[in-house]
Image: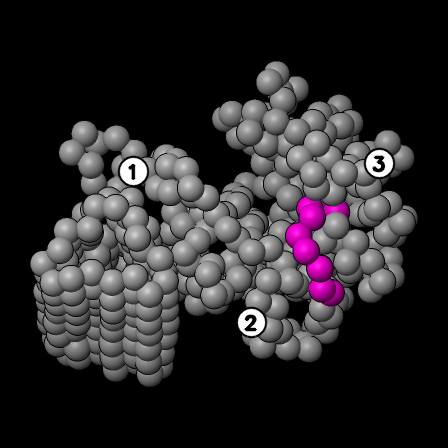
Amino acid sequence: MQAVILAAGEGTRMRPLSGRIPKPMLPVADRPLLAHTADAAVEAGATELVVVVGYEADTVRRHFGAEYRGVPVTYAVQAGQHGTAHAVNAAREHLEGPFVVLNGDNLYDPAAIESLFARCPAVCAVEVDDPRNYGVLSTSGETVTGIVEKPDDPPTNLANAGGYAFPAEARDWLEVEESERGEYEITDVLARVIDREAVRPVRVKRWLDVGRPWELLAANEWKLGALEPRVDGDVHDNAVLEGSVVVESGATVRSGVVIEGPALIRSGASVGPNAYVRGATLVAEDATVGHAVEVKNSVLSRGATVGHLSYVGDSVLGENVNFGAGTTVANLRHDDEAIRFTVKGERVSTGRRKFGVVAGDEVKTGINTCLTPGLKLSAGASSYPGETVDRDR
């Protein structure tokens, strides 16, 4: 069965991290977010991956090539982003039979994807406490009888988790009417399948829609927590590794370092001396954690550097960020309220008691800079030595 994976969007809610990199290609543990979805499809038996691309498409093509893990990869281009049905319709000419549709910016329980492939037609469903912000499935026994978007009075607590197994006939049903929000929705295709066939719900034990920076942190917390400890790189005898820690070949962990997993130190990265890395932390390729630095529950993207005597907590640093010596990230409000962050011009709650800074690519801070909680630093932004930055820039 073919797997259509949607990866064309700009990821505006993920800014500034998606300013140069498509959201599905942001790092989650040892691979891009999109690769976790592709892996789940391959392991479920996909015969071909049809990846729908658009924004920064070449980044996706370079990573996956013409074949991924022995499975052929075809690319379909979505010209403009006009909804999920519009995206799948871009792949229409490549579809030859029953097909699965997955979101490239979602993480799925791999067992559920295996069930999705086996139960066509089917839809992934996840139980949520408050389904009013989701598409909600109605069911009768083990059959889906309908779907309604963001209802005030939800018929069930089963939310649509964005994974679909469609019969071959659905290829001809992809041209749907524009919705009230001005998009062409794949749920309208699902509704048509429900009217004609017995669609089964596939209950997903764990699922995450990775749309905003703190959800990228959550994605890394999930996938780093699943790593098996492994040391292939150069670790000094005086370093201490505790819990699930992976040090890849080509990485260096210097004297006096303490790493409390789950943590992943990728090839070319350097930690220490005398540094402390804890929580679910990713130190990506060629990133540097300097002398006497503490990094807690954070993502340091490729080439990011945190200078000596600094603290970074609950934060995401983009590629080639350079924090000057003594930079301190504050990640907690005095009133213990959830940290708020700017998404598309609006301050919204992250739902997290602790959340630090999101720094776009090539941000630079002067020595002894203080960064306040929930701060967004756009790509290329900088600070003066000794400055306290308390507003987005």
Q: Which residue is mark 3?
A: 192
Between circles 3 and 1, the one closer to the viewer is: 1
Q: CA distance from mark 2 to mark 1?
A: 32 Å
Q: Is residue 379 left or right of residue 58?
A: left
Q: Which residue is mark 2?
A: 59
Residue 235 percent across, percent down from the top left: 22, 78
What residue is at 61 percent from the left and 68 percent from the top? 57
- Is residue 81 found inside the magenta-colored segment of the image? yes
Q: In this rendering, does residue 229 appear at all?
A: no
Q: Earlier in the sequence, mark 3 or mark 1?
A: 3
Magenta-drawn segment: 76-85
Q: CA distance from mark 3 to mark 2?
A: 35 Å
In the depicted structure, whether residue 333 falls above or below residue 173: above
What residue is at 82 percent from the left and 58 percent from the top? 92
Dot 3: few (<14), some (14–19), or many (≥20) neighbours within 10 Å?
some
Residue 381 percent across, percent down from the top left: 30, 61
Amino acid on which the number 2 mark rests in the picture: Thr
